[in-house]
Amino acid sequence: MNIYDSLSGKTYEIVSKNISVYNCGPTVYNDIHIGNARPVITFDVLVRFLKSQKVKINYVHNITDIDDKIIQRAKELKQTETQVASTYIEHYMEVLKALNITPMMMPRVSENIPGMIEYIGRLIKSKSAYVTSVGDVYFDVKSIPNYGILSHQNINQLQEGVRKDMAIDKKSPLDFVLWKKTDSGLNWKSPWSTGRPGWHTECALFINKYIGDHVTIHGGGIDLKFPHHENENAQNNAIYKRNIADIWMHVGHINVNNEKMAKSLGNFILMKDLLTKYSGNDLRWFIYQTKYENPLDYSDDLLKQSTNELNKIFQQINHGFIQMYLKKIKPVKVIASIDKEFVNIMNDDLDIPNAKAYIWSQVKKMSSLIRAKKFDKFQKEVAIVKAELEILGIIYQSPIEIPEIKSLIDEWNLALDQKNYILSDKYRQQLIDKKVL
C-alpha cells in the first residue's frame, strides 16, 4: 500500500505484514463534533483495509482525560474532573459504536502518570529538558538539530509566530512544558513538583509504551501537525535519535462556510446531535466525499445528498433480493473477497472517493443482472460489494433478514397474489417510505 507522508512530501510503500498505527484521540471536556470524527473514521478504514490484506496491526488511540479544559468544564458544571471526563468518555464510546468503529487500544492519561514521570526523567537525563526554579519542566527545542522538520519551518520562523511572554526560567518561547507545577485540579507528586504532565508528552509516552521507539503510521487532524506532532517528534528524537513515525498521515479539516469547524469558533455540529437524524452509515458515507487529506465542506444539503446516494445503493441490492424472494428463489451462501480493482484503488493512498465510485459501477452491473434474471451472478456481485462496504465500515443487511421488513414484503406478495392492487400498492409504498425500495 502506498501512503503519502506529510513530513517528506513523498509517497511510501508499506510492504511489511506487521505494522503499528497511532491516531491522536480526543480531550474529553465536551462531546466531539463531526470534524473530530473524521480522523477516527479515516484511520478505521485504513486499519480495516490493511487487515483485509493480512497485515497485522498494533493500533493505539489515546484518551486525554487530564487537561486545563476539563478543569474549566468541571467548574462550569460544578462537577469533579473525573466526573466530567467519565461522562464524555462514555459519550465518545457511544459515538464510536454508532459509527461502527473497530475496537482498538485506548490508553488514558490518568492511568499512565508514573510512566510519564519516568519518560520526562529520561528527557532531563538526555539534557534535552530542564527544570525551572519553580518546579516546571520544559523541553529545550534547541537541544535537537531538526526541530520544525514536520511543520517545515526552522526555529527562527517558528519563534516569530509565538507569544513573547515568558514563564519563569523558560529559555525560549518555543520550549514546551513537559511537567506543569500546579495545585489546581488533579495533580500528582513528581521529583520536580506537585503537578501534572504536559499534553505533548502523553502521546510520545503512549507510542513508547505500547508500540516502541517509533510507529509505522502516525496521524490525526491537520491542526495537530504543529505544535503537538512536532513536539512529540522532538521528544522521540531527543531519546531515540530518530523520528517518532515512519509515515505521517494528516486528515483535513471539515469546513462550514469555508471556515474550519472548531469548538473555539462556535461553528461545530456535535456527532451526538447528528446521530439522532442520521445513521452511522450515512455519516461515514458523507466523510468519504473527498480524499482524507483535503478539506471537506459540511452542509445539511450535502449530508442529505450523501445519504440519498447510499440509500440508492442499498435499494438496488434490496430490489434484487426481493425479486428473488417473490420468485421463491432461495439465496445461496456466497463467500467473496473484494475485487482486485478495489484493492488497487485503496492501495493508492487510501483513495476512498474513487473506491465509492467503483462500488457504484458494481451496483450498475447488479441492475443489469437483475433485469436479466441472472440471480446467481447477482448474489456473487452482492457478496463482493458487501465485503467492500465492510472495508468502509458500512453495514448492509438484506431486507429479508429484518423481521419487520420481511413481514411487510409477505403482505405485499399476498396482496399481489390476490390481485388486490390497491392494497399491494399500499405495502409497496410503505417499503419505499422505509427506503427499502
Image: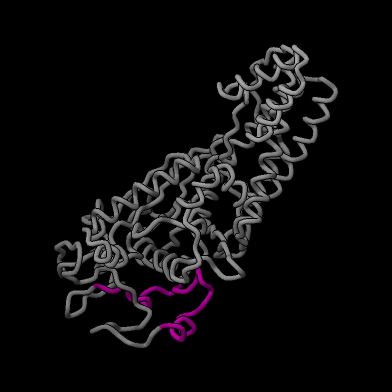
Against 119, is 137 above or below? Answer: below
- Residue 337, placed above or below residue 311: above
In-front residue for pair 159/405: 405
Q: Is residue 247 placed above or below 17 in the rendered structure?
A: below
- Return the x and y of residue 303 as percentages of the image width and height: 62, 52
Q: Which residues are magenta?
A: 137-162
Q: In screen coordinates, is 97 left or right of 399?
A: left
Queried whether the magenta region covers residue 260, the answer comes back as no
Identify the image quadrant of residue 227: bottom left
Whether 159 is among the magenta residues is yes
Residue 379 visible in image? no
Residue at left 38%, top 62%?
236
Query: Considering depth in this image, is 331 or 118 the residue closer to the camera?
Result: 331
Res 190 visible: yes
Q: Nearer the viewer, residue 335 or 304?
A: 304
The C terminus lies in which quarter of the figure?
top right
